[in-house]
Each structure stands twice: as C-alpha cells, then as structure tokens.
Image (cartoon, helix red, strand yellow):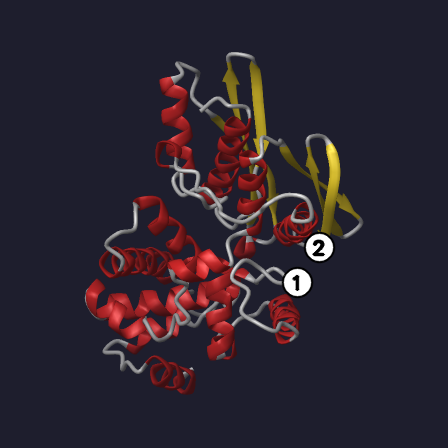
C-alpha cells in the first residue's frame, strides 16, 4: 500500500498531508481489514460534479442550464470515469478480496482495446462501476486533504479527468437514444424501445409507429439500448433527415436521456396537474452487499389511467428511482401531456 500511495501521488502530482486518506481511497469494501473507499467515493462524486459545473459555467457563459447539465452528465458518467481509471491504471492500486472484479475489469479492458476512438456513451461492454468508484474516491481523498477547497481541487484533478467533453464534442457525437427520440418527435412519429432477456443477454428493440426498425443485444441493458438506437438511426437516415437536432427544454428538462433531478421535476409536474404524487418501488435488489444493484419503478395516476415505468439498473436506489422518473417523463412527453 505504501508503494501504491506513492505511485498515485505521482500520477496526480499531489502529495498528501494525510496519506491514510489515500490508503482508504484505494481500499474496496470487500477488503475488510481496513476502512473502505465508500465515504470518500460519496464526497468525491459530489465534488467532481460541482467542479465540472463551475468549470462550464465560467468557461462557457452562453450555455443555458440544460446544456451545462448535459455536459456534466457526459463528464461524470460511470462510463467516462471508468475510462479515466483505465487510462491511468488506477485499478492496479486497489486492494480487494473480490476475484469477480478482476474478470469484469479484464473484459472491459479487452473491449476498449478493440475500439478505434473514444466512446463517451458506451462501447461493447458496460463499464464496471468499481473503476469509476476509484476515481471518485481518489478525488474525494484529495478534496478532504485540501480542506474542501473546490477551486484548488479543479486545478489538481483537471489533467486526471481529461479528455473533458465540451459542447462541440457532444454536438459531433450526441447520445444515440436521445437523438432517436428527438428525430422521431420532430417527424411526428412515435418511438418505443422494448427490452427482454434472451438467455444471459438483454435484447432491446426499436419500434417506430408500431413497426420494428432495429434491435441490439448485450449482457448489459444499457449497451443493448445504445446499440439498438444506433442501428435504428442508421436505417432511419435512409429516408429522413436525422441532423439539425432540436433540444428538448420543456420545464427545465434538458436533452440528455437520463434527466438530472427527474424525480423532483416529475413531482412538480404531477402537482401542477393536480395528480397524486409519484410512487416508487424497488423491483430488483441484485448482487452482494458491496456490489449492490437496484431496479426501481415509478407509478403515477393520470387523468386517463395509471402509468408505470421501470428504470435501468443502478448502483444506488436514488439513481434507480431517477432513471425510472426519466423514462416516465419521456413517456409523458410522447403522449403530449407536457
């Protein structure tokens, strides 16, 4: 651990006053002989988000709130931070007693090695959460060690987080699922994505106005959805214009498919409609205690009946609920409730 601490200090070009913080940041919950990185990961997650928001707010004064939110989402996603950990070899310094993690990381490494370019929204294999956790915990350790100085933190971690996705990057390569919904909405068409299990894989199929267009499959639902959306856009581009995207900015809802603060936005919308408040339930509770994954649903009673949406698998209940709320908002948009 002493050698690992020294190596990470060199990597981030920062020398810790309290090296125990970095030791904890490099300790997985499965390693029970020492405090784990969970507290530091939590504070690091928040600190990275704040630092990214501040950077784009100051560097791009013409961006509106929704655009800043989308840029933050792209730069702090599990996919992006996992690739940061991979690029700097941070996983080599993690102490743990969970052999399954090694297999997950090797599979991700092999997948990334086959890519030609950076893939901001997901490649062939879903990024292991543990890789993003390490980045967040190391950043959290630095943040605590410099007495919660956010401005100084950004100076230290800016290089670590490169490449920073800019507005120009997202314009060149927007989120495929978002683009699919926007294109169909702009052309007056209804899009539906249906998912089911086929053995060990999830199959995601795209239907436009009730007709099958394309599908994708993967062990991870998120990757299957991305592949299906990409394939559908290729086919749709043969007979309609899928460029000149129009951003969805209804009631503060930005153009990213996963809507930040979706639970609150959905709650506020139901209040305006004088509907009962949304109710959330945990549909699935997966994995061991140190690698928990959750799937949540949300139900709302509209004027025409009860709607229910099930979100994507997430590592935190609040994120799983937000995913379900995001999908519910998109469903309400499609049905012209907004």
Check the picture and name the quadrant holding the N terminus: bottom left
Helix, strand or loop at disc 2?
strand
Q: Which residue corresponds to the image point at 51% horizontal and 50% vertical from the top-left?
A: 315
Check the picture and name the quadrant holding the C terminus: top left
Q: Is residue 275 left or right of residue 63?
A: right
Q: Is residue 190 left or right of residue 249?
A: right
Per the image, the residue denoted by label 1 is 124
Give the class, few, some or many, for how many residues have Cα within 10 Å of label 2's Cα (few <14, many ≥20). many
Q: Are marks 2 and 1 in contact (CB under 8 Å)?
A: yes
Determine if residue 38 is in view.
Answer: no
Helix, strand or loop at disc 1?
loop
State the image quarter where residue 9 is shown: bottom left
Q: Residue furthest right?
A: 199
Give the class, few, some or many, for how many residues have Cα within 10 Å of label 1's Cα (few <14, many ≥20). many
Task: Using the image, determine if residue 124 lies above or below residue 302.
Answer: below
Determine if residue 46 is in view.
Answer: yes
Q: Which residue corresponds to the image point at 56% horizontal and 12% vertical from the top-left?
A: 304
Q: Position of residue 71 (x, y in %)?
A: 39, 55
**Which residue is more in the foreground, 172 or 241?**
241
Q: Which mark is residue 259?
A: none
- Label 2 vs 1, first from the N-terminus: 1
Q: Is residue 216 left or right of residue 297?
A: right
Per the image, the residue denoted by label 2 is 218
Q: Position of residue 27 (x, y in %)?
A: 45, 70
């Amino acid at each position: 651990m002493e050698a690992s601490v020294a190596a990470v200090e060199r990597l981030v070009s920062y020398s810790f006053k309290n090296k125990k913080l970095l030791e904890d940041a490099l300790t997985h919950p499965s390693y029970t002989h020492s405090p784990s990185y969970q507290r530091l990961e939590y504070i690091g997650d928040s600190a990275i988000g704040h630092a990214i928001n501040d950077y784009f707010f100051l560097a791009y004064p013409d961006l509106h709130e929704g655009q800043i939110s989308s840029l933050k989402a792209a730069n702090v996603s599990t996919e992006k931070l996992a690739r940061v950990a991979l690029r700097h070899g941070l996983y080599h310094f993690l102490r743990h007693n969970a052999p399954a993690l090694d297999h997950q990381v090797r599979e991700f490494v092999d997948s990334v090695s086959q890519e030609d370019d950076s893939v901001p929204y997901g490649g062939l294999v879903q990024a292991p959460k543990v890789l993003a956790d390490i980045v967040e915990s190391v950043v959290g350790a630095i943040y605590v060690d410099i007495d919660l100085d956010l401005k100084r933190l950004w100076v230290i971690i800016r290089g670590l987080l490169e490449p920073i996705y800019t507005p120009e990057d997202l314009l060149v390569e927007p989120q495929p699922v978002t683009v699919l919904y926007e294109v169909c909405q702009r052309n007056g068409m209804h899009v539906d994505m249906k998912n089911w299990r086929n053995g060990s894989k999830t199959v995601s199929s795209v239907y436009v106005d009730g007709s099958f267009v394309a599908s994708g499959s993967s062990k991870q639902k998120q990757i299957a959805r991305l592949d299906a959306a990409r394939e559908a856009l290729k086919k749709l581009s043969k007979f309609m214009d899928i460029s000149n995207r129009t951003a969805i900015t209804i009631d503060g809802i930005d153009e990213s498919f996963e809507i930040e603060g979706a639970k609150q936005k959905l709650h506020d919308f139901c209040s305006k409609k004088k509907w009962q408040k949304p109710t959330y339930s945990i549909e699935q509770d997966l994995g061991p205690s140190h690698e928990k994954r959750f799937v949540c649903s949300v139900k709302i009673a509209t004027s025409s009946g009860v709607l229910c949406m099930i979100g994507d698998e997430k590592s935190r209940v609040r994120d799983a609920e937000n995913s379900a709320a995001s999908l519910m908002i998109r469903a309400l948009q499609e049905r012209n409730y907004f």
